[in-house]
Image (cartoon, grey):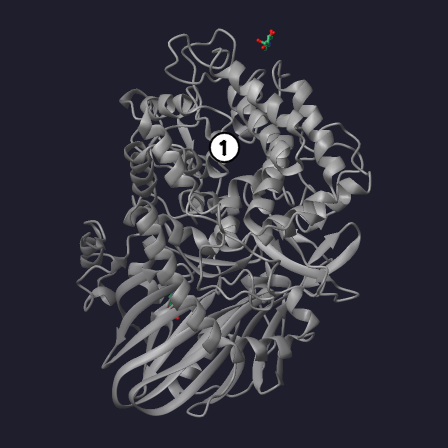
Amino acid sequence: MRLDWQAPLGLGSLCASVLSFFCSEQQSAVSHHPVLPPSYPLAVRNPYLSAWMPSDRVQNLPHAEPQFWAGQNLGWSVIVRVDGRAYSLMGVKNTSASDIHPAIVHRAEFTASHSVFDLSAGPVALTLDFFSPVSPSNYLRHSLPFSYLTVHVTKSRGHDIQVYSDIDGRWTGRPRRSQSAFEEADGLAYYSLTVPTARKYAEANDMALWGQAILASRPSDSSTLTASSGNAAEVRGLFAGEGNLAGVHEAWSHESVVALAHDLGKVDGGASVNFVVGYERDHAINYLGEPQTGYYRAKYPTTSKALSFFLDDYGDALLESLKLDQELASSATAAAGPKYADIVTLSTRQAYGGIDVTIPADSLDTNEVLAFIKELSSDGNVNTIDVIMPAFPIYYVMDPDYIRLLLEPVMKYLDAGRWRLPYTIHDLGSSYPHATGHDDQRAEPMPIEECGNLLVLALAYVRATGDVSWAAQYTEIFKQYADYLVHNSIDIANQLSSNDAAGPLPNETNLAIKAAVGLKAFGEMSGYEYYSRVGNEHANLFFEQGLGTDDEKTHFVLRYPDRPKSWKTPYNLFPDVLFDLDTFPAEAYKMNDAFFRSKSVRGEYGVPLDNRQDWAKSDWNMWLAGTFGTATRDEFVDDLWAFMTSGKHTWPFSDRYVATSKKGANPGTPILCRARPTVGGHFALLALQGPRSMKSLSRYPSGPGISNQGYGKAEARFRSRIEEL
Ligand SMILES: *[C@@H]1O[C@H](CO)[C@@H](O)[C@H](O)[C@H]1NC(C)=O
Ligand SMILES: *[C@@H]1O[C@H](CO)[C@@H](O)[C@H](O)[C@H]1NC(C)=O
C-alpha cells in the first residue's frame, strides 16, 4: 500500500500570509492521486489542442490559468452559482474584481484519460472532470479535435444551481487579432475564435494560427443554456449577478471571453453538465502539397455536426475510458509495479496528444488513413523516424496499426523516389504541419539510426498485426537500407544518433547494436537469411569478440575501439528482447544488468544517457529497463517515478532531465523536452506482455486478422534465459 501524496510544507504558510484573503477557509492541502504529477493534462488530443494545469497551481485552482503545452497561459474559467452566490472553480484570476468567491479544492487525480478535481462551493460539492478520449483504433472517436469538461454537482439539497465556463482569445495564439463568432445549430451552441488574417498552416509559438478554438455545449432535459461574449469581468459579473447570460455579443477585444452557462434550477442530489473545448483545423496537415483533414470529417463534415456527435458519443466514450483506465493501471501494476503504473498512466494522453489522424481533404476516403506526429518542443519536425521509434511501445500495446499509419506517409515519399540518399530520411518535414519531405536531400543526417529504426519498426508492425502485405510492398526499399547497414555499421563514420544533443561520434557502440538488431529484424521479416547471419556476425564481433566492450566484459563502451572506461545506455537492445531475435547472447544481458545496477552510474534520479552527460532520457531508460532482470528494472522504474513525482518541476512530462548532480546541475530539472509523444516509450515494459493487450479499447474499424499467439510471452522466455546463467 502506498500513501497518497500530500503537498509539501509551505503552502500552509503561503495561505497564512499573502493569499490569506481567499485561503481563510482553505487550511488543508490538496491531495494528489495516485501521486503528484508535474502537470495535469486538461484537454490534450493533438499538437494544437494541448492544455495543461501545472500541478503547483492546483492548490489555487479557482484562480489558476491553464497552459498550452509550450508554456503560454490560456484563459479558461469555470464558475458555479449556488443560491445566488458565485464561486470560482477554475481560472478566475482576479476574484476581487467581481462578486465571485473561490471554491475550496480538496483533491486532484489523474487517470490515463481523465484529470479530476474535487472542490466544494458553499453547501455543495463539485467535480471537474477533464476527459480527453484515448481510443486509437476508433479513428472517428480518436480524431475528433475536442475534449470534454464535465462539471458534476453532488450533495445538493434543493439548491439553485448554475454552471458557467468561458475561454479567451489566447487559445488562438494571437489574442489581439482574434475574432469570435457564435452559432446555434444541430441542437447545440458554440463559439469559435479565429485569427482572420492568419495564413493557412501558420504557427506562432507552436500554436496553430489557422483553424478555430471552440467552446460548445447544449441544453439538456434539466438545464437551459445561455451565451454571451465580451469583457471578461463584465461577462463573469453578469453571470455572478443574474445566473444566466444575456445572449449579447459585444465588440471583441483581447480582454474578451466567450461564455456559456447552464441553469440547472433546483438540484436535489446530483446533476452534471458537459462543455466541449477544442481546436479544429479544416485543413489539418499539408501532405506533399495536398491537404489532409481529420478522419471524423468523412462522416461529420461541419463543426456543428462533429460537435453534436462528440456530445452524443459521451456515454460510450466515457464507458470505454473507465475500462481502459482501470485495465491500464492494473496491467501496468502487474507488469512492473504501482510506480510503473503511475508513469504509463500519466504518459498516455501525452503520447497520443502528439498525433493527428487524417484522410485526404478532397476525397475524404476513409481507406486512406494516415497519421502525423509532431516532434514537440525539440524542433517540430513531422513524422521523425527516431520519434516514432522511441514511442512505438505504446502503439504496440494499444494499437500497432499506428506504426503503419505513421510510417506510411514516409514510405510513400521514399517509394516515389524523391529521397535519393543511400540511407533513410530523418523526418517528413522540418516543421509541422508541413509534411512536404526533403526534395533538397537535406534532412538532419542520422544514417545508421534511422535505417535501424525503420527496419525494427516494420518488424514490430508485422509481428504485432500479422499483416505481412504492407511491409512486403516496400521490401526493396527496406532491403536498400539493410544493405546500407551491412556495409556501414562496423567502421561507423562520425554521425549523430537520436540524442543529437549529445553530439556526433564515430563508432558509437549503441548504433552498432541498433544496426545488428535491425539486420536481424529485416532478415526475420523478409526471410532473407543472409541479413540475419550478418546481424549475428556483427553482434558476435561487438560482444563475444569484445570490440564493443571493455576487456573484462563488464559493459558496452560508448565508442570503440580502446575506450574501456566509457559507457552508454545500450537501449537499442530492447527490440532484440521484445521480438526474441537472439541477436545478442544472454551473457550480454547479464553483463548489462550487473553494470547498470552498480552505484557508480546511478545518479539521484537514475542513470544518465552516457558517461559524458548528467542528463537522462526517460523513454530510452524504460527501453533499457525492459532488457534487465527484475531488480535492476525496478531501480530504473523507481528513479523515473522519483523524477516524475518530485514536485520540483511543472512541465508536461519531460523525457529529458538532469539525473545526477555530478556536474553541479540540480538533479531532477527537466531540459528542453516537454509534452513529447516519445513518452510512449514508457510502455516498453508493458509491450513485453504482448501486442494489443488493452482489451477494453474498442476496435474500429477492425484491423487485419490478429493473432497474438507466440508473441505474448517474450518477457517470460527472456527472464528464464538470463536466470539460467
Ligand atoms: C483586481 O480587480 C480590482 C477591482 O476591479 C482591481 O482594483 C485590482 O487592481 C485588480 N487586481 C489585479 C491584480 O488585477
Ligand atoms: C572505428 O572502428 C573500426 C573498427 O575497429 C576502426 O578500424 C576505425 O579506425 C575506427 N574509427 C575511429 C574513428 O575510431
Q: Is residue 202 above or below residue 629?
A: below
**498 vs 393, nearest the viewer:** 393
User: In this rendering, does residue 351 appear at all?
Assistant: yes
Residue at the (29%, 22%) spot, across then down = 598
The x and y percentages for residue 102 are 30, 71
Can you name the residue that lies furthest to the right here? 417
Question: Helix, strand, or loop for circle 1?
Answer: helix
The x and y percentages for residue 539 are 53, 20
Q: Is residue 399 above or below residue 122?
A: above
Answer with the quarter of the image where residue 283 lies: bottom right
Taking the image as shown, residue 479 lies to the left or right of residue 545, namely right
Residue at the (51%, 32%) spot, across then down = 581
User: In this rendering, does residue 661 appear at all?
Assistant: no
Residue type beneath disc 1: Asp
* Quarter of the rendered structure image containing ligand 1: bottom left
Q: Is residue 507 above or below residue 45?
A: above
Which residue is under mark 1?
576
**458 vs 540, nearest the viewer:** 540
* Mark 1 surroundings within 10 Å by alpha-carbon count, few (fewer than 14), some (14 through 19), many (20 or more): many
- Quadrant the C terminus occupies: top left
Residue at the (38%, 72%) spot, across then down = 97
Answer with the quarter of the image where residue 614 lies: top left
The x and y percentages for residue 667 are 33, 32
Residue at the (67%, 45%) spot, across then down = 431
The x and y percentages for residue 347 are 43, 51
